[in-house]
Amino acid sequence: MATIAPPTAAPTYAPPADRTRAAVVPWTLATILVAATAVAVGVIWDISWHMTIGRDTFWSPPHMSTYLGAILTGAACGWLALKTTFRGTDAERAVAVRFWGFQAPLGAWVATWGALAMLTSAPFDDWWHNAYGLDVEIVSPPHTVLALGMYAIVVGAMLMTLAHQNRAEDPRARRTLGMLYLYACGLLVTMVSVFTTDWTWRALMHSEAFYQVTALAFPLFFLAAARGSALRWPATKVALAYMGVRAVMTWVLPLFEGSPKLGPIYQQVTHFVPMEFPLLLVVPALVIDLAYARWGRSGRDWMLAAVSGVGFVLAMLAAHWPFGEFLLSPASRNWVFATHRFYYAMPMSFPMVQHRFMDLPTSLASFATSIGIAMVFATLAARFGLAWGGWMARVQR
């Protein structure tokens, strides 16, 4: 059973004025952030690989990027646990969590579990495909273990960065660590956006499901980031980190040649097909930041959650209703938005290939009801986010 190391006053982290910024960020923390980035990039790259080539081999480059993240995480966290346990200072042990006799920060344990889950799923996934076929089910047991491991690595990176931020007293150190924490939150939102892809296609931006799914998925993380952050405009910075990662992948992947190796082939593909252009989450994130700046410290969390939830849905509606029309228009068929590139197995009869919306509301009353439900979902998600963020604001280990 995991136990907390003997209670000792957690030391503050205040580097001398002449220390460089690199000294503020331990190499283990930097390594885990790189690993989390490799995992997020690998997932997006792997989906693009499937849309362009199909499943090739277990040793495909996207898989290697993903598993590199697991290996880096395991190496950095393993070293940190051994060093803290056997050669750690009293200050380092004071901010550690004890597990099976070893000591390491909480985030390191979470990330280690994620790395082990990912590496365990690798041979399992290969065997599954050999036994049952190529991606006959997306939500297969090995894929589920792999996904949980990926999320754990990103959450572990976020918790480690958060603990360093919360212990920092020097303003420059706190600012640097705070930015890295928000970047880690952005990676988590990126992973969540991948999970919600089937409900957030551009052709679904006028559908009821689009607003309900996004209301469930994103306010939680924006409000958690806002309450756990020491910086201004935290939700906006998280949204920009997410949009930056997704946009760069949208622009870079089509630079490389690729063609299908599996059938059926309905679309002629010569270069990598990227995922959808990122959602304009920066718009509702701005609304959430404005609400948090006004009521975040008032103690009226349910009111803040309601304002943030309703504001999130209205901002999503205002931003994505016209954005969906733009993405289905000829103006978006360029290298920036890449809406002229389609998955090789997408039939010509598919609405998105024909540049038209799908799953449109049956009536205005039905749509209004669905938006109301989305506001309830967003309010509840925001309230959970505030509770989670309140815990994260106290993390020291």
Image (cartoon, grey):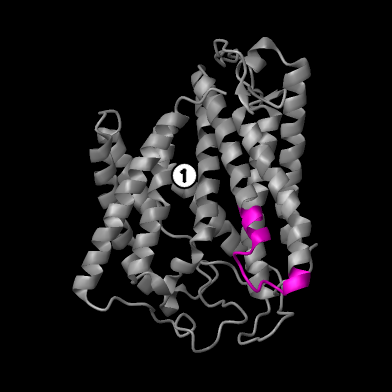
Residue 219 percent across, percent down from the top left: 38, 48
In the displayed structure, would residue 26 be above or below residue 71?
above
Question: Is residue 232 in view from this perspective?
Answer: no
Q: Is residue 130 magenta?
A: yes
Which residue is drawn at the image coordinates 53% and 41% (left, top)?
Answer: 183
Q: Is residue 368 left or right of residue 187?
A: left
Residue 394 percent across, percent down from the top left: 46, 24
- Residue furthest left in the image: 365
Q: Quadrant of residue 359?
A: bottom left
Residue span colored magenta: 129-147
Q: Quadrant of residue 225?
A: top left
Quadrant where the image shows the C terminus = top right
Residue placed under numbered mark 1 in the picture: 238
Which residue is drawn at the image coordinates 71% and 40% (left, top)?
Answer: 73
- Number of disc labels: 1
Residue sitting nearer the eye, 357 or 370: 370
Quadrant where the image shows the N terminus = top right
Residue sitting nearer the eye, 366 or 266: 366
Query: Considering the numbered disc 1 on the image, is that residue within a helix, a strand or a loop?
Result: helix
Question: Is residue 54 in view from this perspective?
Answer: yes
Residue 366 percent across, percent down from the top left: 23, 72
Q: Is residue 114 left or right of residue 339?
A: right
